[in-house]
Amino acid sequence: MSMWLMTGWTPDVSIQTIIYVGFIQGTSLGLLFVPLTTEAFATLPALRAEGTGLYSLSRNVGSSVGISIVTVLLTQNIQANHEQIGAWITPFNRAFEV
């Protein structure tokens, strides 16, 4: 199961796993958005222009919010990891003696 969750990947992950998971994610998004767009516009015969604008707006706002949330989480995790690593780098740690 950890193959599907990229948070469980280590630096030892194989290139085949990266390609396979990327292919599955890309195919899944293609299979999701095409029917969603088709269904959204099929029910709007008279208001298609307004529906297109609202649909594009909602997708752009959703993408922006998602990117913002991921950026905040990434920044928090980087700071936490930096703090954990920095706790071990001291002049008293014998592993760093030359």
Image: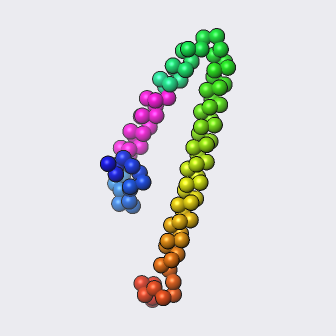
Q: Quadrant of residue 24?
A: top left
Total label count? 0
| Residue 38 horizontal/vertical position (percent) | 51, 20
Q: Main secondary structure of the magenta part?
A: helix
Quadrant hosting residue 48 = top right
Left or right placement of residue 13 versus residue 98 in this view:
left
Q: Residue furthest top?
A: 46
11 is higher (above) or lower (below) than 83 = above
Asked where in the image residue 10 lies, by quadrant, the reply is bottom left
The location of residue 32, given as percent across then percent down, is 46, 29
Residue drawn 62% across the image and 42% down it: 64
Range drawn in magenta: 19-33
Farthest left residue?
1
| Front one among 98 and 37 | 37
* Residue 84 to residue 94: above or below: above
Residue drawn at point x = 55 percent, y = 56 percent: 74
Q: Is residue 31 magenta?
A: yes
Q: Is residue 17 magenta?
A: no
Which residue: 62% across, 31% down? 58
Name the residue at 42% across, 84% down: 95
Residue 86: x percent and y percent? 52, 75
Q: Quadrant of the C terminus?
A: bottom left
Render colour scheme: rainbow
Q: Position of residue 46 (x, y in %)?
A: 64, 10
| For residue 92, above or below residue 7 | below
